[in-house]
Image (cartoon, grey):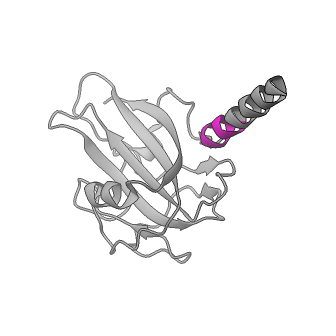
Amino acid sequence: MFEALARFLSATEAADQETTMALLLTTTAFQDGGTIPNKFTCAGTDVSPELAWTDPPVGTKTFAVIVDDPDAPAGTWVHWVLYDLPAGTRALTEDMPRDGQLPDGARQGQNDFRKIGYNGPCPPKGAPHRYFFKLYALSCKTNLKLGASKRELERAMKGHILAQAEMIGRFQQ
């Protein structure tokens, strides 16, 4: 009986791990850890890349996306803040509009360029910078106002993150 209970507990732990690890973020624009093409940077047309992800854990109510550069000279530089994406969303199209309020109810925050929506990599000349594309599955809607900051979003997400996925792109001028 104890062996059966141990097998059950082990299977339950494995299922819990799968739930939290199952969220996977991808893009057709570049490989994880690879170079971000100019098209998605200030050296090109500066459009957002297409993003896609797998099914989130049960209980997901919304998604949030943060893109930032921890290698910026002045500290982490925020390139995109997107929140309250509906739970049924599994992808973002390339060249997302830079509107504060999107048709599906999602909202975009202010980046460190003091603009709404996506602004891509634009580092000073020198060593490559890393750009972290982070996706969060949340158990609630944030209800943040349009143009919220990364800090405001992180506060609203605290205690509500069910799963997280991340990928990194690199860029240098």
**35 over 138 or under it: above or below:** above
Which residue is at the front of the view, 3 or 83? 3
Image position of 108 (left or right of 104): left
**114 over 29 or under it: above or below:** below
Q: Residue at x 24, y 23 (%)?
A: 126
Residue 101, how many percent across, how many down?
43, 76
Q: Residue at x 44, y 63 (%)?
A: 83
The mark tally for this picture is 0
On-image quarter of the C terminus: top left
On-image quarter of the N terminus: top right
Residue 127, how many percent across, how many down?
28, 21
Which residue is at the front of the view, 5 or 83? 5
Image position of 93 (left or right of 65): right
**43 over 169 or under it: above or below:** below
Residue 35, how many percent across, how many down?
47, 29
Asked whether residue 20 is in view, the answer is: yes
Which residue is at the front of the view, 148 or 140? 140
Asked whether residue 118 is in view, the answer is: no
* Secondary structure, magenta segment, majority class: helix
Residue range corresponding to the magenta coloring? 15-21
Q: Is residue 133 part of the magenta span, yes or no?
A: no
The quarter of the displayed image where residue 12 is located: top right
Image position of 31 (left or right of 40): right
**67 over 32 or under it: above or below:** below
Residue 81, how many percent across, how many down?
37, 57
Q: Residue at x 19, y 37 (%)?
A: 75
Q: Residue furthest left?
A: 74
